[in-house]
Image (cartoon, rainbow, N blue to C red):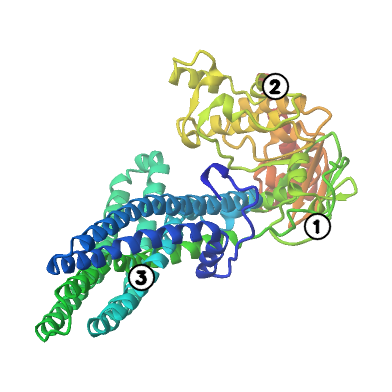
Amino acid sequence: MQIQDLPYSDPGVPDTRSGPRFLWWLGRNQLGGQCRALLWGLLHFLSVCGLPFCVGLAVQAVVERSGARLVQTGGLLLLCGAGIALGDTMLHRAAVTNWITAAARVQQLLARRTAMLGSALTRRVAAGEVVAVSTGDVEKIGWFVEAVSRFSAAALTVVAVCVGLFVYQPALGVVVAVGVPVLALAVLPLLPRATRRADVQRQKAGRATELASDTVAGLRVLRGIGGEELFLDRYRRASQEVRTAAVRSARMWSLIAGIQVLLPGLLMIAVVWRGVHLAQEGRIAVGELVTVYSAVMLLTYPLRHFEEIAMAYSFSRPSAQRAARVLSLDRATDAAGSRDGHLPDGDLYDPLTGLLVPSGLLTAVVCGDPDAAGVLAERLGGHPAEKSASVLLGDVPLDELPLDAARTVVLVQDKDPVLLSGSLRALLDVPSSGEVGAEEALAAAQCGDVLDALTQGAPEAGDPLDARITERGRSLSGGQRQRLALARSLITDPQVLVLDEPTSAVDSHTEARIAEGIRKLRTGRTTVVFTSSPLLLDRADRVVLVHEGEVAAVGLHRKLVHDDPRYREVVTRETEDEDDGHGAGAGSEDNATARNAAMAEGVLAGLEEIEETA
């Protein structure tokens, strides 16, 4: 796999049983790239370690005054130099290719998993963790994949040099063959402690990042209550904990690096001491001593990759574990589906609650529990949190449709929609039927003042649609963000549109106009609105009360307000205790009934007055 071939047509099915298994799966899927990097690495390292033999031959040729051998040695040196240059260049290219393709594979897997899970992902994993996995953790995983081939080439080179020295000069080769494994394995007892300290540092850094993100996101609220200094002190303490943990981790890695410098030095001293004695006894030539000394000195170069692979694995293992945890999350239903992609039509029915949404009508659903409303909205869109009886569209279970088809036919807008940064035109450029234009959707969502605000903030934009929206729309108010998100949903013009509290952050006058805009724009289309707003409920063709997980009442808003005390309690915020208190004070059940009726009439009169004003 080459960089120009990205993205993958199919990134594969990862092994998410553990972090090491996930790393092994990545390595297996890049076997060709790893082999290329290994071969170029062998060329590079063997050429580097071939220099001492050339130097030893040259010294021996000078001692023996052999010009022909000196010329031959010069040719070997040039050959080694060419191998070093070519091997280093191609090793770097192959290793970076492995890093980028591995990182791209992980990011592609994460993107697909995020798209498949949808809003269920952030209920099971913190959004900050998903971001951390897709950025910093991906980089560390790519580092390990890149380092594996270099380490493999370095390890094979060390073995080849030790064998070569043992054959070339057995008396000194034995010292090197015994000392090099000690060098390679000396740091192993320290790695678990270094890994634990690195994990502590990352955990504290993650908590500090979350605290900083929460502070920035809630800066307006903090200023309102005067809590800036409080959160600033908390962040100072968190950052100091990160600094302390980083220093402790750095001390351990510096100790490991020091050992990697100390032990090769001691081995070199031992080789020189032993070689000098052998040379004095006449058992080895001067050129052979120079060759062995130079080989030991240059062995420190490939041996450094032993430290690198230890660090790469220590940092990438927890990162791979977090990535595997996210990638192991699955939907309650099969995303592939068991039916073809044919889009069904008809009434929407939830057998779990008994909710029936007639085709082509505006149905309002009232739930006393906002969380239950959110879960039910996702069920209606074919995204159940748990495995249960499937919602039916016509006579087709949504769970049996492919995920793309289910999302095409039913669109769910949750109560906290997210605006992506970029131009307003790009925000509204979403898959749609093409029958609803941007101007119509923006008008129905009452976004006139939003366009004015965006234009004032970007006077250089000639068209309001070219105005820029900041990250998550932070420059806009909550109501403005909500209306833009509603306009985006209206543009898609799905067969079934499910809106969860689409007007909770707007004033009553704007809410009345939005309710009328939704009704007109969605004429002939199925629309479900989860709300307790009387303004929206009064314009619905059908109102359904869901109480304790089941449909409790069905009718029109005005009739339900009169006849159903549970509905009235949710919509008017009037409790049964208050209702009973009024009845007891009147002294009779008839008086209580009359009083409730009068109160309901008062609510309706107020609604009519609001309508007329709007």
Up-down relation of residue 282 to residue 361 (above or below) = below
| In front: label 3 or label 2 | 3
Q: Identify residue for label 3.
A: 195
- In this view, the residue farthest toward the top is 462
Q: Do the residues labelled 1 and 2 touch (CB within 8 Å)?
A: no
| Mark linked to residue 183 | none
Left or right, 40 with reference to 110: left
User: Residue 40's spot in the image, x, y percent?
Assistant: 42, 57
- Packing grade of label 2 (10 A; few <14, some 14-19, many >=20) is some
| Mark linked to residue 437 | 2
Q: Mark 3 vs mark 1: which is more N-terminal?
A: 3
Distance between the alpha carbons at the discs numbered 3 and 2: 56 Å
- Between 509 and 218, the residue placed more toward the observer is 218
Q: Residue at x 49, y 52 (%)?
A: 103
Q: What element carries label 2?
A: loop
Q: Can residue 195 be seen at all in this image of the molecule?
A: yes
Q: Identify residue for label 1.
A: 352
Q: Can residue 581 be seen at all in this image of the molecule?
A: no
Asked which quadrant contains residue 610, the reply is top right
Up-down relation of residue 200 to residue 30 (above or below) = below
Asked which quadrant contains residue 326, the reply is bottom right
Left or right, 117 with reference to 352: left
User: Residue 434's spot in the image, x, y percent?
Assistant: 74, 25
Q: Mark 1 vs mark 2: which is more N-terminal?
A: 1
Q: Which amino acid does label 1 sit on?
A: Leu
| In front: label 3 or label 1 | 3
Q: What residue type is labelled 2?
A: Gly
